Amino acid sequence: MPKLTPQQMKEQLAASPGWQIENGELVKSFSFKNFVEALRFVNRLGEAAEKAGHHPDIDIRYNRVRLALVTHDAGGITEKDFQLASQANALG
């Protein structure tokens, strides 16, 4: 899957609430009621990521979960990253 151009990323970001580009990665932080809810979100997202064959970097801090997406084999952000971001938004 080819890396997106800056213009394509800008267009995708406009349709991806809460996501932004940081250090070449597509990132977003989610907040939950408590640690257990944060873990449930991570587990549901983990199942979606496994099915997609695309795995985010996940940082859990009590009730906050930070996701970072990049398609390493393409050398940057691709449509695959935005697809998983959309799934994360639906689950969050």
Image (cartoon, rainbow, N blue to C red):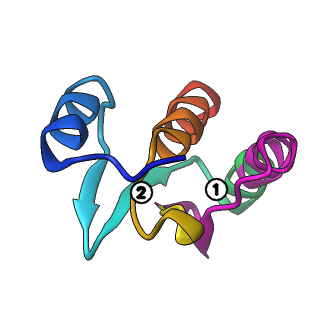
**Residue 34 — which label?**
1
Q: Where, by quadrant of the figure, is residue 29 drawn?
A: bottom left
Q: Please say whether residue 51 is one of the residues in the magenta stretch.
A: yes
Secondary structure, mark 2, is strand
At label 2, the amino acid type is Ser
Determine the residue positioned at 58% across, 69% down: 73
Residue 51 relative to residue 61: left or right: right
Which residues lie in the magenta part?
A: 42-68
Residue 10 relative to residue 51: left or right: left
Q: Judge the density around disc 2: few (<14), some (14-19), many (≥20) Cα neighbours within 10 Å.
A: some
> Residue 35 placed where, x, y %?
69, 62
At label 1, the amino acid type is Asn
Residue 68 relative to residue 73: left or right: left
Q: Is residue 61 visible?
A: no
> Residue 50 placed where, x, y %?
85, 50
Determine the residue positioned at 59% across, 40% down: 84
Q: Who comes first in sequence, dot 2 or dot 1?
A: 2
Q: Is residue 45 above or below residue 25?
A: above
Q: Is residue 21 above or below residue 17?
A: below
Q: Is residue 81 above or below residue 25?
A: above
